[in-house]
Amino acid sequence: MKDHLVRIVSRDGSLRAVAATTTILAEAICSRQGTDATAAVALGRLVTGTALLGSLLKGDQRLALMIEGNGPLQKLHAETDAYGHVRGSIKNPIAGLPLHEGRFDVAGAIGRAGFLHVIKDLGLKEPYRGMVQLYTSEIAEDLAYYLTTSEQVPSSVGLGVYIEADGTISGAGGFLVQSLPDASEETLGQLEKRLTDLPPLTSLLRQGLTPVQVLENLFEGIPFDILTQTELEFRCNCRRDQVSQVLLSLGREELQELIERDEATTVTCEFCKEVYTFHREDLQELLDA
């Protein structure tokens, strides 16, 4: 089954939620980035969280999440649009950390000090930019902390990535639940108990539960309606003309230095790892233009 997300709202209008499976998506991105197991869990979580938050986008709107920490991974970046197209990158793909209490040390790989950046291109003159300090560096908690404190929407986020012995991702996904102004104490208490009693998310994903089934587990006893279902896939929007503009931004003097080198100039996209080659005559055309 293809990766996809499902967005719902409770019938009383007090809760909204989205759940997603991102196994194929996370594997596609992490394999391109050459991550080790710990880095794959971290990047897979961020990619999934980005897809969840992107479910509220419309039209040509875009969303980017970036984590900068003082751990070995340094910087993680993921982007999405309203159509479920997601891409991601990581500054250092090798965390090189041992297991911590039997689990991948994502917090140690990201670092205990750093920032979560949220950039939304909503079609206005300037993108919206939000930033919070990392809360626990476990990513799910950091996203919930940002949504609750910066956007003033009480939120719970669950993210899971399961790595096989050979380093491949066999299960990835997550959920986002948000409380709306009309939520009653009774409903919130019911949801909180379900969140506490929910089995580990990776266990549910490896059992093959769909996003709807994950939400049915979470919302047991709380009727809801499905609003939308969106397929998710890796897609990079880099193009040769965009790379040309980056080279032009270097300035005339640096372009001339590249032309005078013996070898061709190559530029590699940080997201899809596509290599763009510019020979001397290509650079001369840019310079003449």
Image: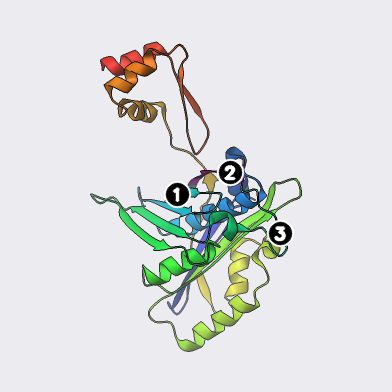
Q: Residue at x 39, y 82 (%)?
A: 182
The magenta stretch spans residue 24: no
Which amino acid lies under the numbered mark 1 shown in the image of this protein?
A: Thr
- Circle 2 crowding by C-alpha within 10 Å: few under 14, some 14–19, many from 20: many
In space, the residues marked 3 and 2 are separated at their CA atoms by 25 Å
User: Which label was assigned to residue 93?
Assistant: 2
Q: Is residue 225 visible?
A: yes
Q: Which one is nearer the viewer's eye here, 138 or 163?
A: 138
Q: Relative to the observer, which residue lies in front, 73 or 205?
A: 73
In this view, the residue farthest toward the left is: 125
Q: Which residue is depicted at the point 39% across and 56% down?
A: 118
Could you tell me the amino acid type at mark 3? Arg
Q: Quadrant of the C terminus?
A: top left
Q: With 169 as the anchor, is 276 left or right in this view?
A: left
Work out whether 178 lies above or below 84. Answer: below
Which residues fall within the magenta stretch?
Answer: 86-94
Residue 274 circle label? none
Q: Position of residue 206 (x, y in %)?
A: 71, 59
Q: Earlier in the sequence, mark 3 or mark 2?
A: 2
Q: Is residue 96 above or below residue 138?
A: above
Q: Nearer the viewer, mark 2 or mark 1?
A: 2
Q: CA distance from mark 3 to mark 1?
A: 25 Å
Residue hosting label 3: 206
Under circle 1, the secondary element is strand
Image marks 2 and 1: residues in contact by CB distance under 8 Å: no
User: Quadrant location of residue 223?
Assistant: bottom right
Q: Name the disc covering residue 80, or none.
A: 1
Q: Residue furthest right?
A: 165
Residue 211 image point, x, y percent: 59, 62
At horizontal 29% and vertical 20% (from top left) the residue drawn is: 253
Q: Is residue 88 magenta?
A: yes
